[in-house]
Image: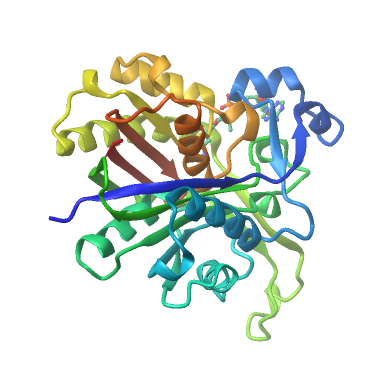
Amino acid sequence: MVKVSILGLGVYLPSKRLTNFDLEKMVDTSDEWIRSRTGIVERRVASPHEKTSDLAHKAALQALKNAKISAEKIDLIVVATASPDSSFPSVACKVQKAIGAKKATGFDVSAACAGFLYALTTAKQYIQTGMAHHALVIAAERFTDLIDWTDRDTCVLFGDGAGACVLGKAKSGHITADFLQAFGDQWDLMQVISEGGRSPFHPEKTACAKLPYVRMQGQELFKMAVNSMADAIEKVIKKAKIKKENIDCIVPHQANDRIMSAVAKKLNISKDKIFINIDKYGNMSAASIAVALYEAVESKKIKKGDNVVLVAFGAGLVSAANVVKW
Ligand code: UT7
């Protein structure tokens, strides 16, 4: 079986910072509540001119540069996003044009906060089967577009950003195991709701009352997040044939610092092994793990030879995990 590795990583984070103190002026909340209940201090917000595809493009350019691969060599682009510029064309096709990856094919995947790992695992299969040689995997979100900015339950949690990686045949290290699972019976715990519509065939829905916005049942999601991420870690390390003690670094989806503490406690793993950057960016949905992985490598929290576990949970509900021998 062909071994597939991450050849280079990239990120793009919009420059505008939205602090907890800024949010205090917008809704009935406090810096103290947000910090203590979530660990978030600030998050980034894309400028009005920066679409999701622009964030994806910039992260992709850095990943290509770090992988030392030209765009012409990319034959697959997979973009994970819950906040595409529009329902079509795909963000992947827009990125293809922007970077000039003329021979590539591309598509978007929808797996919310677990999207980066779904995209990574999908692209890995393309390379293993010989369908592609070099793939660009991007996670990009302009999630602030999906927020009801009068709802304090959700508006304090999310931010915008993008991360990307280039995959190819292993040079050193490789993705050793994958785990994906869906819990569709609980889809209603987190969803994007649209009120109104324009179809003349459903007249009661024709008044376009409100743009799409996120609604979630926080406490239920919290429990599911802890249980499903702990379970995904146990299953993926079993597949990778490594023990908990051999994990060097866990890069989890960044939804809540308390979720990460609870996962560490449940698995009896030191929290020091978990990479956390939620304080700086909040929850960037699919982009969270991609950005955290980049920062963990840059800050030398991940070193050559390490056993790295990526683990995610998101709307769907879905969970995912990968083991990467770095
Ligand atoms: O990304 C993947 C999916 N998402 C998740 O996994 C999110 C998982 N859930 C969570 O992280 C947490 O449940 C939240 C951060 C969303 C909420 O934290 P919580 O500790 O579960 O709070 P809660 O919903 O139980 O609310 C506690 C109190 C309530 O007030 P009362 O009823 O006790 O008077 C809320 O109204 O906190 C109140 N509250 C707030 N207060 C100040 C809720 N949001 C805020 C806020 N500022 N922003």
Residue 193 screen position, x and y as percent: 61, 58
Say how many tags the image has: 0
Compared with 266, 56 (above or below) is below
Would you say residue 317 is visible in this rendering?
no
Q: Quadrant of ligand 1?
A: top right
Horizontal relation, residue 64 to residue 53: left or right: left
Q: Nearer the viewer, residue 188 or 282?
A: 282
Residue 58 screen position, x and y as percent: 61, 55
> Residue at the location (26% across, 62% down)?
127
Residue 310: image quadrant is top left
Horizontal relation, residue 110 to residue 244: left or right: right
Q: Nearer the viewer, residue 20 or 293?
A: 293
State which quarter of the image contains the N terminus: bottom left
Residue with the most extreme bottom position: 200
Q: Nearer the viewer, residue 116 or 219?
A: 116
Q: Which color scheme did the rendering employ for the protein? A: rainbow
> Residue at the location (30% across, 14% down)?
268
Residue with the most extreme right position: 25
> Residue at the location (66% across, 82% down)?
199
Residue 236 screen position, x and y as percent: 23, 38
Q: Nearer the viewer, residue 229 or 118?
A: 118
> Residue at the location (51% across, 31% down)?
219
State which quarter of the image contains the C terminus: top left
Horizontal relation, residue 324 to residue 138: left or right: left
Compared with 322, 120 (above or below) is below
Residue 213 screen position, x and y as percent: 66, 54
Horizontal relation, residue 18 to residue 224: left or right: right
